[in-house]
Amino acid sequence: EPEVCARVARENLDLVRGIKVRIGANTSGANGIMPLHLAIEAAEGCGLPVMCHIDRPPPRYEEVLAVLRPGDTLTHCFRPFPNAPVHADGRVREACFAAREKGVLFDVGHGMGSFSFAVAEKMLAGGFPPDVISSDVHTLCIDGPAYDNLVTMAKFLNLGMPLPEIVRATSATPARLLNRPDLADLEPGSTGDATVLEVRDGSFTYQDVTGATLTGTKGLAVRAIVLDGKLWSEGPGT
C-alpha cells in the first residue's frame, strides 16, 4: 500500500525518517524485487529515503543496487554467500562501486545471518568499507554472534578498519541519514550525547554468522555515557 504508507509518513515526519523494505527469498519470496519498487514509490510520495534489507536471492545483489537511488541505504551489505557483495575470487562486485558513486549507502546490519568475516576482509581489502556499522540486535542474536554494536565495532577494529572511520560509521553518518546531525555533534548547543569508549588490549574471540571465529588483540569497553550534556553513567573501574 505505497499511497497509504506515504500518507502516514507525511503525517508523522517528526518520527518517520525513511521507508524500510525487506526483500529476498526469505522475506519477499516469489515477489522478488517488486517490494523495493513499491517502497520507492512510497518514499517518493513523502520525500524520504529507503532502507532495503537483502537476504538470499532472488533478487540478486546487483539487481537491488541498480534500483536503489542516491541517499538510499542497503542493509546487511556484508552478508555471506549466496548474494554476497564479492565474487567467488574475492573481488568486490563492480555494482558496489557504481552504487556508491551514485550515492547509495552501505550498512552492516550484523544480525543473525548478515555478517561474514571472509566477506568483510575482502571488502576492506578491496577498498570498500561500510558507511554505517550497526548490530541489528534481536532475540536470535543478542546472545551471539552479534551481541551489541560495541562488539560489532570491535570486529571491524580487529579486521584493520581505522578507529576514526569506525566511530564515524556509528555516529556521524547514521546521524546524518536520520537528518539529526546534532546527535553526532559536540559543538555548543548540540544535543550533547556522547559515549566514551576505551580500547583494551588482550585476546578476544569474535564469531560471525557462519560460525567462523576471529581471535583479535583489541576489545572495546564503555567508560562513560553522557546524555544531554550530563554524565549519565560510568563503566566499571572508571
Image: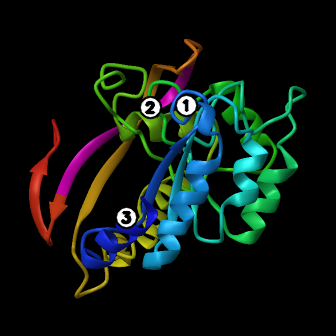
Q: Callout 1: 10 Å neighbours few (<14), some, many (20+)?
A: many
Question: Residue at the spot x=44%, y=31% of the render?
Answer: 111
User: Where, by quadrant of the figure, is residue 14 drawn?
Assistant: bottom left
Q: Of residues 5 and 209, which is closer to you in this image?
A: 5
Per the image, label 1 sits on a secondary structure element best described as: loop
Q: Which residue is mark 3?
A: 5
Per the image, label 2 sits on a secondary structure element best described as: loop
Residue 199, visible in the rendered structure:
yes
User: Which kind of residue does numbered mark 2 sit on?
Assistant: Gly
Question: Residue at the spot x=82%, y=52% of the render?
Answer: 95
User: Where, by quadrant of the figure, is residue 58 drawn?
Assistant: top right
**Number of marks in the image?**
3
Q: Which residue is mark 1?
A: 114
Per the image, label 3 sits on a secondary structure element best described as: helix
Tell me residue 7's x, y (percent). 33, 73
User: Which kind of residue does numbered mark 3 sit on?
Assistant: Cys
User: Which kind of residue does numbered mark 1 sit on?
Assistant: Ser
Name the outermost residue toward the bottom.
189
Question: Residue at the spot x=52%, y=27% of the render?
Answer: 217
Q: Which residue is mark 2?
A: 111
Question: Residue at the spot x=39%, y=76% of the render?
Answer: 179
Q: Of residues 52 and 5, which is closer to you in this image?
A: 5
Q: Quadrant of the N terminus?
A: bottom left
The stretch of residues the image draws in magenta is 215-225
From the viewer's perspective, is residue 66 above or below residue 109?
below
Q: Earlier in the sequence, mark 3 or mark 2?
A: 3
